[in-house]
Amino acid sequence: MKLTVSEEMDGERIDKCIPIFCEGITRSYIAGLIKDGLVKVNGKQVKPSFSLSEGDEIEFELPKATLPDIVPEDIPLDILYEDADVIVVNKPKGMVVHPAAGHYSGTLVNALMFHCRGSLSGINGILRPGIVHRIDMDTTGSVIACKNDSAHNSIAAQLKEHSITRCYRAICFGVISEDELTINNPIGRNPSDRKKMAVRPDGKEAITHIKVLKRFEKYTYVECRLETGRTHQIRVHMASIGHPLLGDGVYSNLKAPFKLEGQCLHAKTLGFKHPSTGEYIETDAPLPEYFEHLLEILK
C-alpha cells in the first residue's frame, strides 16, 4: 500500500498517521510493523517516532488478516416483524450489530444466524450476513435484516432513495425553543479524530427533522426523523446545534447526572415497502425501561 502525506498530516508521527487511513488498525500494531522494517518512507526504513513531511511517500504491507469463524449463538431476540424475506428486531442497549475487531460474539448477527438457520442474505459477506443498515451499540431499537439477496437489494435501494421511515426518540441537553426544526448540515469524517464524525462543508448531505415532544427544566424530549442516514447523524446534528444527547460521551463533554450507558437514543419507528408484496410495513419498538424511567424522573 502506498500513501502520499498531505498538508494536513505534515509534522505528524508516522505511527499516528497510518491508522487514520487504515480503519481497525491500532497505533501500537503499526509501531510493531515499523520496528520490523515493514514500513518505509521515501524508500527508507524509519522509527515509529519519525515525523512526516508533506509529499513524503509511505509504503507498507499489512499482513493478511485471518477472519475468525462467526458462529450462530442462541441469544434471545425481541422480534417486531418477521416473514420469509425480512426480520425486524428491537435491539437492546450494549449489543453490537455485526462482528468487528473486539466483538466477534454476542452480536446481533450471531443471534440472527441462530434464529434464521442460514437464511440470511449474503451480499455483505460473512461478517454482516443479512445486515442492510445498523445502529450504534448503545442505541436501542429497530434494525431490519434481510433473509435473501432480493430482499436485501430492495431494502438497500429504499435506504438509498430515503424512502424508509426512520423515527427516533432522544433526550438532549438544554431546552429547545422551537417546536419543530430541520437540521440540514453535511456530515463527514472528523479530520482530527477519524473515529468521529463532524459537520463539515465537504461532507455528505445529512438532513434530520426534529420535533419537540416535551420540555423539562434542563432537557428536551424529542423525535428525530432521518431523511438521510449518515454515521452518527442524530448525535452529530444535535451536538452541532448545542443540544447534544444525554449520555453521549463522544459528542458531548457535558456530564449527565444519571447513570447512563451511552447516548439516550432509541430507534422507535421503522417503515418500509415490503420487498415481495410492495405493501407498506411499519413497526414500532417500545421505549426501553431505562428510557421510560428517565422520563419519569425528569417530570
Image (cartoon, helix red, strand yellow):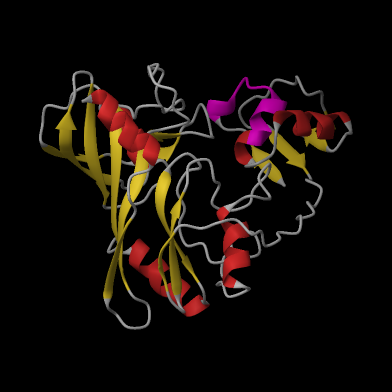
* Quarter of the image where one finds residue 177: top left
Image coords of residue 117 (percent x, y) = 62, 73
Quarter of the picture containing the C terminus is top left
Q: Is residue 211 above or below residue 91?
A: above
**Any part of residue 161 in sight:** yes
Image coords of residue 142 (percent x, y) = 39, 55
Determine the residue positioned at 53% across, 66% down.
Answer: 130
- Specify the segment rendered in magenta: 7-19
* Quarter of the image where one finds residue 40: top right
Q: Is residue 156 above or below residue 25?
A: below
Q: Nearer the viewer, residue 127 or 188?
A: 127
Q: Nearer the viewer, residue 146 or 72?
A: 72
Residue 64 in the figure: left or right of residue 252: right
**Any part of residue 242 in sight:** no
Q: Overall secondary structure of the magenta stretch?
A: helix
Image coords of residue 98 (percent x, y) = 58, 53
Query: Is 143 contained in the magenta span?
Result: no
Determine the residue positioned at 53% across, 27% down.
Answer: 8
Image coords of residue 274 (percent x, y) = 34, 75
Determine the residue positioned at 19% across, 18% down.
Answer: 217
Residue 150 in the figure: left or right of residue 50: left
- Looking at the image, the residue that sits furthest to the bottom is 277
Determine the residue positioned at 70% across, 33% down.
Answer: 26
